[in-house]
Amino acid sequence: MIRVCFVCLGNICRSPTALGVMRSLVRDAGLDRALELDSAGTGGWHAGEPPDRRAQAAARGRGVALESRARQFIRRDFDRFDYVIAMDRENHAELVKLAASAAERDKIHLLRAFEAGGGELDVPDPYYGGERGFADVFDICDRACRGLLDHLRAAHALESS
Ligand code: 4NP
């Protein structure tokens, strides 16, 4: 079982979107039993909350349900997860600060590093913007999660069940 945690700032917009997209891709690929997925935020202000309504609406429009509850990423999560996937460079830097060893730091990656043909590194924070930002976040997560799934399949020889 490979364990993956998506991490943004508040855990109510970007990482729940990436989680919902990835769950849907993993289900379609028949890899539910090979991959365990979760999300968290570097900040804890929204702990216990469902995803932002605008993120839910953007995802629902594309056939993806967002069902997570916000929680803060804690140091022990580095024990639980093999891949800690940051939504932007700021989240990445916070996670690097929290990591206690080189082995833990090696688990941290930027989501957009897996986007085919990408060049941008950050999933832009949509929280203070309009609906359009949430649609863009969904599209970015969709492209990057497809790349991430391809990477995981190749790196771990994952097989459908
Ligand atoms: P997220 O977006 O990191 O994609 O969940 C945000 C959510 C809340 C806040 C900032 C970003 N906030 O400042 O409360």
Image (cartoon, rainbow, N blue to C red):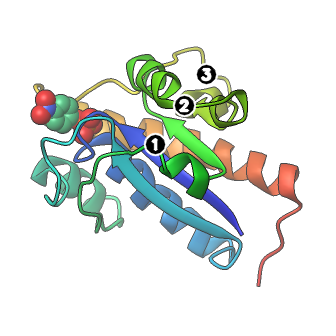
**Disc number lying in front (1 or 3):** 1
* Label 1 near ligand 1 (CB < 8 Å): no
**Amino acid type of disc 2?**
Ala
Give whichever of discs 1 and 2 has the lower sequence position: 1
**Amino acid type of disc 1?**
Arg
Residue 75, placed above or below residue 97: below
Q: CA distance from mark 2 to mark 3?
A: 27 Å
Residue shown at the point (29%, 63%) measured from the top left: 66
Residue shown at the point (59%, 14%) measured from the top left: 119
Residue 130, placed above or below residue 49: above
Residue 147 at what x, y percent from top left? Answer: 67, 42
The residue identified by callout 1 is 75
Q: Hey, which residue is sitting farthest front in the picture? A: 100
**Amino acid type of disc 3?**
Gly
Q: Secondary structure at mark 2?
A: loop
Q: Nearer the viewer, residue 104 or 34?
A: 104
The quadrant where residue 73 appears:
top left
Q: Which mark is residue 53?
A: none
Q: Secondary structure at mark 1?
A: loop
Q: Can you say which quadrant of the picture contains the N terminus?
A: bottom right
* Label 3 near ligand 1 (CB < 8 Å): no
Residue shown at the point (36%, 48%) measured from the top left: 40
Image quadrant of ligand 1 equals: top left
Q: Nearer the viewer, residue 37 or 127?
A: 37
Badge 3, how many Cα within 10 Å: few under 14, some, many 20+? few
Q: Secondary structure at mark 3?
A: loop
Q: Which mark is residue 99?
A: 2
Give whichever of discs 2 and 3 has the lower sequence position: 2
Badge 1, how many Cα within 10 Å: few under 14, some, many 20+? some
Q: Nearer the viewer, residue 134 or 18?
A: 18
The residue identified by callout 3 is 118
Residue 49 at what x, y percent from top left? Answer: 13, 58
